[in-house]
Image (cartoon, coloured by chain):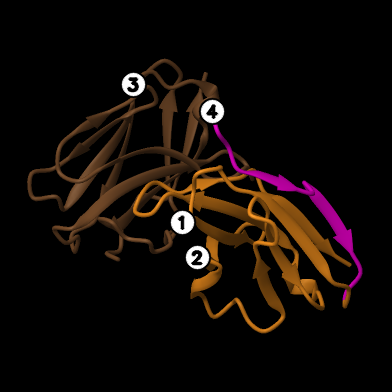
Amino acid sequence: DAKTTQPPSMDCAEGRAANLPCNHSTISGNEYVYWYRQIHSQGPQYIIHGLKNNETNEMASLIITEDRKSSTLILPHATLRDTAVYYCIVRGVGSQGNLIFGKGTKLSVKP
Amino acid sequence: EPEVTQTPSHQVTQMGQEVILRCVPISNHLYFYWYRQILGQKVEFLVSFYNNEISEKSEIFDDQFSVERPDGSNFTLKIRSTKLEDSAMYFCASSFPGNTIYFGEGSWLTVV
């Protein structure tokens, strides 16, 4: 699986959009971009995933660049409960393989 | 919404004792996983399990670890002789083949 690069930490004001970047320049055509988050020491929580089109669900939006070498997770109206470590992970389409977690981005939402 | 459930939430054990951590995966899922996270460190893959056998394991998953699906609903991780360095949060996860992996809330193991 391709490796990803994320900033170690970011701050966001409550109510504002949080934009979390991820670089995955070695991604191959059959690999998805997945986003998970971990609040304190709870289990990783699935947020969203995409292949090449932008995706939106009730939690977030995922914007993938046309060359697929980077993506941005957008939390449209961040709340204090969104404070967590966010992980960007690349995983093969149809893969039964496990997820490889990096260090992620520690997002701190401030009042 | 279906979820992965784990028991116990927290266990304290003496070094050298056997520990069994239990998980009930999401009901129609066919792939099962164990991950661990030592305090302050990354989430690490231990093992994946499919069709009643291990499909992949990491170098962390040595002979002191074993997994089992004893009754078609539970998925267990056994640590035969615990060491201090086994103290960690252990996460169970499950997925339908090729689909999103969902995690439980974890079992915190403290070895003293």
Disc 2 to disc 1, C-alpha distance: 31 Å
Q: Position of residue B68 (x, y in %)?
A: 66, 66
Residue type at tag 1: Lys
Q: Residue furthest left?
A: A66
Task: Please state which of the two labelled residues, at mark 3 or mark 2, is closer to the viewer.
Answer: 2
- Label 2 marks a residue whose chain is B
Magenta span of residues: B1-15
Return the residue at label 2: B51
Task: Please state which of the two labelled residues, at mark 2 or mark 1, is closer to the viewer.
Answer: 2
Q: Are marks 3 and 1 on the same chain?
A: yes
Mark 3 neighbour density, 10 Å: few (under 14) some (14–19) many (20 or more): some
- Label 4 marks a residue whose chain is B
Q: Colour of chain A?
A: brown
Asked whether residue A97 is in view, the answer is yes
Q: Residue furthest right?
A: B14
Helix, strand or loop status at disc 3: loop
Mark 4 neighbour density, 10 Å: few (under 14) some (14–19) many (20 or more): few
Q: Are marks 3 and 2 on the same chain?
A: no
Disc 3 to disc 1, C-alpha distance: 23 Å
Return the residue at label 1: A103
